[in-house]
Amino acid sequence: MEQLLGDPDLVDQANRYLKEILRRIVLTPDETAQHGLAVQIETDFASLLGSDLTAEFGTTSTHLDC
């Protein structure tokens, strides 16, 4: 992945996809986490697959807790 993202054209492409699916990233203090922070990433993966998936499942957002 590091080699692929070393290509400026691929970095631009990845950036466009990430902008499309990432809605919000929340960092909160967490003493039990390895680096002292808990991360909540709110995404919209359905946007990558088009409106058909959204219509079929009736949702536009997916939440991932890391």
Image: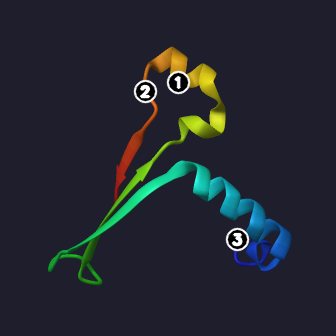
Quick check: 41 above or below 54? below
- 1 or 3: mark nearer the eye: 1
- What's under tag 2, amino acid-wise? Thr
Q: Earlier in the sequence, mark 1 or mark 3?
A: 3
Cβ atoms at labels 1 and 3 below 8 Å apart: no
Q: Earlier in the sequence, mark 2 or mark 3?
A: 3
Extreme residue in the top direction: 56
| Disc 1/disc 3 C-alpha distance (Å) | 29 Å
Q: Which residue is located at x 52 percent, y 15 percent? A: 56
- Please name the residue that numbered disc 3 is placed on: 1
Q: Which residue is located at x 70 percent, y 71 percent? A: 1
- Give the percent coordinates (x, y) of residue 47: 59, 37
As helix, strand or loop, the secondary structure at mark 2 comes to: loop
- Please name the residue that numbered disc 1 is placed on: 54
Local crowd size for mark 2, using a 10 Å CA cut-off: few (<14), some (14–19), many (≥20): few
Quick check: 13 above or below 28? above
Cβ atoms at labels 2 and 1 below 8 Å apart: yes
As drawn, the label of residue 59 is: 2
| Disc 2/disc 1 C-alpha distance (Å) | 5 Å
- What's under tag 3, amino acid-wise? Met
Extreme residue in the bottom direction: 35
